[in-house]
Image (cartoon, grey):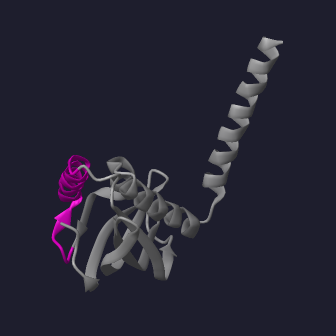
Amino acid sequence: MLKRLFLLLALAAVLLAGYRFARRALASDEQQIAWVLDEMCAGFAATRMNPVLSGLATDWSDETLGADRELVRAGLAQLFLEQRGSGASGFPYRVEWRGTRGPTVDESGQEKSAELELELEFFRREGEVERSLWRTSVDAQLRKRDGEWRFVRTSTHTLEGRMIR
């Protein structure tokens, strides 16, 4: 009886993993790019650096800010550690994105590429109130490398507020 239950649970786990793999593999490029952005935003709110950094190519840079992947890593580490040490209940920041144009996918090169315009809005929770800190427009270029979409270049323009520091 216990052996059958274990086999049934193992089969269910394999089927679920297969479904998730197939769903990701068969999704449109636009959907895959949206998932990258969703994972980056969720990782930021959960103070998990890997989901944020995994959306950035190793050679990523922001032309406006002069930032690269290592600068983002260092900035996130500092922000996450500062907020954990502040005694506040939970990480007070989160970010939302919305596409304003694209993504426009180009399959003509050796690697698929895409261009996208989006807005990011960063919020800070203070007690029961949440306020917008920074709203920015981002022009982005992405490449699909090793089956994953990653940002390779961005240009950032502040629309309102100030960047989190």
Q: Residue 80 versus residue 114: which sits nearer the camera?
A: 80
Percent coordinates x, y for residue 160 in the rendering: 28, 86
Q: Is residue 144 visible?
A: no
- Quadrant, the N terminus: top right
> Which quarter of the figure is the C terminus placed in?
bottom left
Q: Which quadrant of the structure image shows residue 60?
A: bottom left
Q: Residue furthest bottom?
A: 159
Residue 139 can be seen in this image: yes
Across the whole image, how many numbered discs are drawn on residues? 0
| x and y percentages locating residue 149 in the rendered image | 45, 60
Residue 157, placed above or below residue 77:
below
**Image quadrant where residue 159 sits:** bottom left
Question: Along the line of sight, which residue is nearer the eye, 30 or 135?
Answer: 135
Residue sticking out furthest to the front: 127
Any magenta on residue 74? yes
Task: Give coordinates of residue 85: x percent, y percent.
Answer: 21, 47
Residue at position x 22%, y 56% in the image: 79
Residue drawn at point x = 34 percent, y = 72 percent: 122
Which segment is the magenta one?
Answer: 63-86
Q: Main secondary structure of the magenta part?
A: helix
Decide if residue 45 is on the left or right side of residue 69: right
Is residue 77 magenta-colored?
A: yes
Say which residue appears at 21% left-offset and 48% top-offset. 81
Residue 2 on image: x %, y %:
78, 13
In the image: residue 162, left or right of residue 13: left
